[in-house]
Image: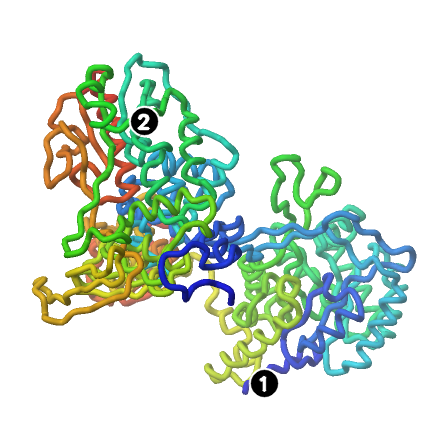
Amino acid sequence: MADLTTEFLGIKSPNPFWLASAPPTDKEYNVRRAFEAGWGGVVWKTLGSEGPPVVNVNGPRYGVIHGADRRVLGLNNIELITDRDLQTNLDEITRVKADYPDRAMIVSIMVPCEEQAWKDILPRVEATGADGIELNFGCPHGMSERGMGAAVGQVPEYIEMVTRWCKQYYSKPVIVKLTPNITDVRKPAEAARRGGADAVSLINTINSIVSVDLDSMSPHPSIDGKGTHGGYCGPAVKPIALSMVSEIARAPATAGMPISGIGGVTTWRDAAEYITLGCGNVQVCTAAMTYGFKVVQEMISGLSEWMDEKGHRSISDFMGAAVPNTTDWQYLNLNYISKASINQDDCISCGRCYAACEDTSHQAIAMSEDRTFTVIDEECVACNLCVEVCPVENCITMVQMAPGTTDPRTGRVVEETYANWTTHPNNPSATAAE
Amino acid sequence: MADKIYEAGVQAGRLSAEVYDTHFSDLHPALDIHEAHVAADRCYFCHDAPCITACPTDIDIPLFIRQIATGTPDAAAKTILTQNILGGMCARVCPTEQLCEQACVREAAEGKPVLIGQLQRYATDHLQKQGIHPFERAAETGKHVAVVGAGPAGLSAAHRLAMLGHTVTVYDARPKPGGLNEYGIAAYKTPDGFAQEEVDWLLGIGGITIRNGSALSRDITLDELRGDHDAVFLGVGLGGVNALDASGADKAGVLDAVDFIADLRQARDMAAVPVGRDVVVIGGGMTAVDAAVQAKLLGALNVTLVYRRGRERMNASPFEQDLAASKGVRIVTHAVPRAVHGNGSVREIEFDYVDADMMPTGDTLRLAADQVFRAIGQTLEGDHLPALEHRKIKVDGTGRTSVEGVWAGGDCASGGDDLTVTAVAEGRDSAMDIHAALTGGNA
């Protein structure tokens, strides 16, 4: 069986599945149960400064986008950082870490953007024996109104400054958690690196209003008739997070920087995908909040089985494997030509491919009287929409045209050579081809 | 067990009251909102969907299912009822496994179609339970149409005509409107007085008067109706029953299945309906299955359904046959009645086994029988009717008969299957043609 042991910033954990800083990691009771269920590590829910803790709303904190059968596709929350006493949290962290030395224990922190605030809290966190800290520069609601969370994460100079303080007053690894509520995620990542961060983790939640109650005219969740934007997470945000992760993995200024991937990790496959785009591990929240801690067991067995199948002996064997294949549009091979192909044996004649292509694409699918659907190669641009709307997996596939054959759509012979937009004659700034 | 299931003869109250309640409750309990949403989500919203083509009333099924899925069941109901005003009853009695659900692409893909019938019921019940009638009657045209028969065809025609602004009088031979919906369908398919509720709801359009106890040929004549109205629609159904061609068929206890079914539907208390310990039903259609299954549910110990051909030739759908088998009805095929034995009342019935060409094989079968129910087909009754074809009123594609100003539809008319949903379609289409004829168009 594949070895899932992960060493991230020198912090060992039995598997790459950590619970993200969030309600599941708010207290000792939960974290012990999580470790018993098999989670490799936790990022303890964000601690604030000494003093009266923050308060949460006393109405609903969550809103959800549901799929079929009320499957949770996206989760929105307006909960703040821990609303429990700082010392209570620190004591619990100390006890749990002592009892579970093989698990990763990271402490998330959010204190005001003042050196003294960090200078005060960091030694106390260090004293818990936790393995590292994660700086919460991402929380998009509530705390950001007070100049913390995303308000810091949106200003690269602040990130760099605070990170530097942390490296100065704390001896163990510092992870900077990034907000996606920003134009170019590479800038805060670069700032973190300049400040000396050991890693970045991303994404924090996305500003969101999940729905509006059409009777009360209040956003949901509604607190006495009023709502506010929350932070969006869950399966729906994975594509956004993967893209941001890939940008940091690819950018020269941040390439090679350890990344902890966060955003909609629900199955082992999601985790594997994050790792191929350069993450050293993943953090999970919504899947646990939906299914409970036990869900990690499927993640462990699934990742392990896939790694065995592929001959990967450790996470590092495939870490970043997809990064070289993630490129800019302009470098995609314009001589790669394919056509949709419908397997008539698998086709159930629903006609969704036809409706999609006929109404919204290239009129490249023909429908006969007896509901046989066939691709018109002369029109097919291989857009893949039919493949994606077909309810039968693999019934429609994209088949590459062999070099030397003629594309009936363009009448041109398919070339074997690679050619992209940078050299295309239609590109006004094309560099002359040889 | 105190049940009187082993006692010979014809007896009422063979089972306990609780068991009767269970036996005659809804065959398919209504979907709740979550079940409906899960079921609706399975619909692929097919292009030019095969289920629509398979529906005799052309209901836009993908659209109404999507309307359910998006939380607007009343809009879904209106989509259904626009095409089929008796969508609520059809949701309960349609052989969906041979129509829309057979055509469903998920039947092809997985053998598990979208639950179209049950979703249709979810939507129509949702609307009907609020007492909402979703259509408005057009301005009165001053035209008066007679509809004969308050069954599915007649009610469908009457509603459409009234909606278009005509005044409609519906004549029906029975004490209550509804036709086969009220008298001819197994009780467990439409419990709790649904058929009358639906008629009351349908009449909410206004402009329709129902005259019960008025039978064509007996109380009224076609000529009189033609004289008093601008048009006539005949939806009289098949009132006669084919006779049993066997010696001793006149013995007591040899009964018409349709009467048994009607009595069951009108019974207030199933415990009061007598049934034999040994029951034989002759026939292979829905009526035969409805009678056999209900005899079993009433507490008959041995119920045998005997059909002259193979199961594949039975008019009852495979679903209905399986339902009968699951309730403990024994199905015997390739046997025709030869003689009814008994001293005054039936005691036994004897059958000849026959081959594929209906020739006796020489083997016979004798079955004990306290009751024998004939379900070997119904026939058109009445005098001075328009021209017939295959013993039914001959109609063209829009229901016109050989007599000027007279249309016909439903079971009494030629063409189409004898299904509730087909009758509704024919009533509706005749109404549209009558409307065109009365308003100057000649569509």
For mark 2, what is the residue? Answer: B158
Along the line of sight, which residue is nearer the eye, A244 or A340?
Answer: A340
Residue B402 sits above or below residue B144 on the image: below
Along the line of sight, which residue is nearer the eye, B102 or A4?
Answer: B102
Q: Residue at x 19, y 53 (%)?
A: B249
Residue A411 sits above or below residue A98 on the image: above
Label 2, label 1: how far apart the Cα atoms are: 75 Å
Q: Give the crowd class for mark 2: few <14, some 14-19, many >=20 residues within 10 Å.
A: many
Q: Say whether residue B95 is left or right of residue A269.
A: left
Tag 2: amino acid? Ala
User: Which chain's residue wears label 2?
Assistant: B
For mark 1, what is the residue? Answer: A3
Tag 1: amino acid? Asp
- Residue A419 visible in the displayed image: no
Whole-percent x, y for residue B19 in the image: 49, 58
Along the line of sight, which residue is nearer the eye, B116 or B207?
Answer: B207
Residue B46 sits above or below residue B147 on the image: below
Q: Give the crowd class for mark 1: few <14, some 14-19, many >=20 residues within 10 Å.
A: some
